[in-house]
Image (cartoon, helix red, strand yellow):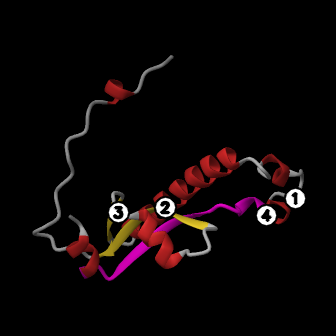
Amino acid sequence: GNVAKSMSAPVVAIIAMDLEFYEHLPTLFPHTDARSWFVGKPEAIRNTAFRNSSLQGAYLIMAARSLGLDCGPMSGFDAEKLNAAFFPDGRWQANFICAIGYGDPASIFGRSPRPEFDVFNKLL
């Protein structure tokens, strides 16, 4: 349902995760052997890569919006086809995509209602 919007956007960014991110840890996190936390642990690799790529994608959206750009983050695309086209070696995998540009004000929804804080935020 978002093909037309994606095709008309000036930029559609692929927010992807590097499934070999841990190979960079000796440089990025040199004070301990963090690489060993992930080697041979595919579930830990995938969970960490997914979480961190989601956070990085959110930072991208916040930065773009702070510049006045509109962002349309999307899931529900054919990740297999996208990964085959852009990341055929399998090291990287798409998390989500995000159209970035100046949207047509006539087609942009206003902010949806938000529940009161205490509806979803509870002290345990």
- What residue is shown at x 24% (from left), y 81% (from top)? 8
First in residue order: circle 4 vs circle 2: 4
Q: CA distance from mark 2 to mark 1?
A: 25 Å
The three-letter code of the residue at mark 3 reads: Phe
Tell me, yes or no, whether the two marked residues, 4 and 2, touch with CB atoms within 8 Å: no
Q: CA distance from mark 3 to mark 4?
A: 29 Å
First in residue order: circle 3 vs circle 2: 2
Residue 66 sits above or below residue 48 on the image: below
Q: Secondary structure at mark 2?
A: helix
72 inside magenta stretch: no
Residue bearing mark 3: 77
Query: Which of the two residues, 14 or 119, is positioned nearer the viewer here?
Result: 14
Q: Secondary structure at mark 1?
A: loop
- What residue is shown at x 15% (from left), y 70% (from top)? 105
Q: CA distance from mark 3 to mark 2?
A: 16 Å
**Stretch in magenta:** 8-24
Position of residue 42 measured from the top left corner of the image (x, y, whole percent): 69, 49
Q: Secondary structure at mark 4?
A: helix
- What residue is shown at x 16% (from left), y 74% (from top)? 104
Q: Nearer the viewer, mark 3 or mark 2?
A: 3
The three-letter code of the residue at mark 4 reads: Glu
Query: Which of the two residues, 19 or 55, is positioned nearer the viewer here?
Result: 19
Tell me, yes or no, whether the two marked residues, 1 and 4, touch with CB atoms within 8 Å: no
Q: CA distance from mark 4 to mark 2?
A: 21 Å
Quarter location, residue 107: bottom left
Residue bearing mark 1: 30
The three-letter code of the residue at mark 1 reads: Pro
Residue 65 sits above or below residue 12 on the image: above
Residue bearing mark 4: 23
First in residue order: circle 3 vs circle 4: 4
